[in-house]
Image: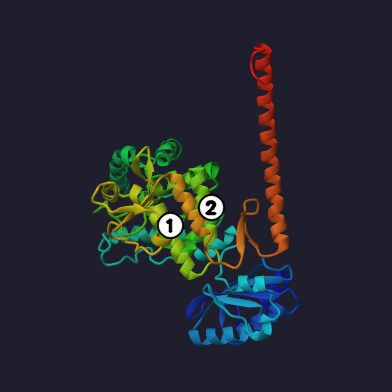
Amino acid sequence: MPDALENLKQLDGIFSPSGIGKTTSVVFTLQNRVGNLANALKIFQDNHINVVHIESRKSRSSDTEAEIYVELETDNIRLQELIKRLKKQVAGISYNDIPVPPSPATAARVPATAEALANAPWFPQKMADLDKAANRVLMYGSELDADHPGFKDKVYRQRRTIFADIAMAYKNGQPIPRVDYTREEINTWGVVFRELNKLYPSHACREYLRNLPLLIDHCGYRDDNIPQLQDVSDFLKERTGFQLRPVAGYLSSRDFLAGLAFRVFHCTQYIRHSSDPFYTPEPDCCHELLGHMPLLADPSFAQFSQELGLASLGASDEEVQKLATCYFFTVEFGLCKQDGHLRAYGAGLLSSIGELSHALTDKARKIPFEPTRTCKQECLITTFQDVYFFTESFEEAKERMRQFACTIKRPFAVRYNPYTQTVDVLNNTRCIAYAVSDLRGDLCIVSDALRRLQQLEFQKEDEEREMDPSTPR
């Protein structure tokens, strides 16, 4: 298939570095047969469509199929004609993450599990695939809303453009560029850092308090220094396997959660405007570094975050929205009881002086966390939340979310393969057999460890009986 792809670059007019119209992504599935890819791409040429990027990968649903990812520039009329013609030839197709039902002629050739995968919204299956979604930000650079504190500040907008350019140019596997923050930016960070640290001992959960000192020791968390993302990423990688990736602004819920599936956290590098250090209408490095990082350094919480990400892959827009809303009211604004008192574990609270203080007062409305109810609650961005959800323990919050994630409707299951850093789709017996084999190996290791511990306990008991014959058996 790669050789055929190279040969097709000879087709005049199909590959072009630029063109008119909007950029659209198309993913289609083909049988691995000579000429199939050439015939499919001939349709692009016949419709005078500019292809700006193309790649192929082995299909997860069948050994005899390949998935072709294409980025193109075209108008809606040509796009619809392209989809219409492609449907007659390929096994499955989607564009802009929207699945297109196969034509009757091709549907009969696609097994049920493969059809379900082909009709699901596109999702990354290897870590490098995150490059395709990381730049689909909803707001970035100098494109600030009129009510943004930095809207009229030309210098601030220029700085935001610099940060956006860094994120847009970043590719998977590269070191995150280091930033020379200005004195004004460092002062803004310092104000937030000092004020929040006054509240943490009485407001933050114990998991947060356990990990923040480690970030101070290893990543340069100080009031006179903004930590570099690469340093924090290296620390998290050693602690929990998570790593950071710079992003220019808001991502869609689907794209953000997909990153978590690979233990990748999309992290902003810019900082809020200095005119109001205690408010930001969007995530910034104060929110990311002070709110999220201490809990991503907790192994159990990191595992929980990845499970939420995996649950989102291939799910419908409606299901992803439910997951995202529950994520918002737990990972961002969640409360839990510890030692008889409510404590914050949500990053949105732990990075906001005003809302962290407010959420733990009697003025704030607080109700038990129940995912089926929480997923219907409105998420507020520019004001305090109308309601906060709490659980009896930190572990209960994670377990309730795990149970809710299992209810997500999806015709296939997925698992993360840490050795290859890929997502395996478990939709046939061969894939499941591989997964069981991995589990069997892990269980053997755990079983051997338990056996050795038991032997040590028996040995200790024998030694105690030798020293004191009256010791009961």
Q: Is residue 126 left or right of residue 302?
A: right
Q: From the viewer's perspective, is residue 407 above or below residue 462?
A: below
Q: Position of residue 401 (x, y in %)?
A: 47, 54
Q: Given this view, does label 2 or label 1 mark the residue nearer the observer? A: 1
Looking at the rendered image, the quarter that the C terminus falls into is: top right
**Residue at screen point 37% across, 43% down:** 337
Tell me, yes or no, if residue 268 can be seen here.
Answer: yes
Q: Position of residue 262 (x, y in %)?
A: 55, 55
| Secondary element type, mark 2 | loop
Tell me, yes or no, if residue 252 can be seen here.
Answer: no
Q: Amino acid at mark 2?
A: Arg
Question: Crowding at label 1, few (<14), some or many (≥20) Cα neighbours within 10 Å?
Answer: many
Front in this rendered view, residue 409 or 420: 409
Front in this rendered view, residue 328 or 142: 328
Q: Which residue is mark 1?
A: 327
Q: Position of residue 185 (x, y in %)?
A: 32, 49
For residue 56, what is the image quadrant? Answer: bottom right
| Secondary element type, mark 1 | helix
Q: Amino acid at mark 1?
A: Tyr
Q: From the viewer's perspective, is residue 115 above or below residue 356?
A: below
Tag shown at residue 263: 2
**Residue at screen point 56% across, 83% down:** 49
Q: Earlier in the sequence, mark 2 or mark 1?
A: 2
Tag shown at residue 108: none
Q: From the viewer's perspective, is residue 50 above or below residue 159?
A: below
**Residue at screen point 51% across, 54% down:** 402
Marks 2 and 1, how far apart at CA: 15 Å
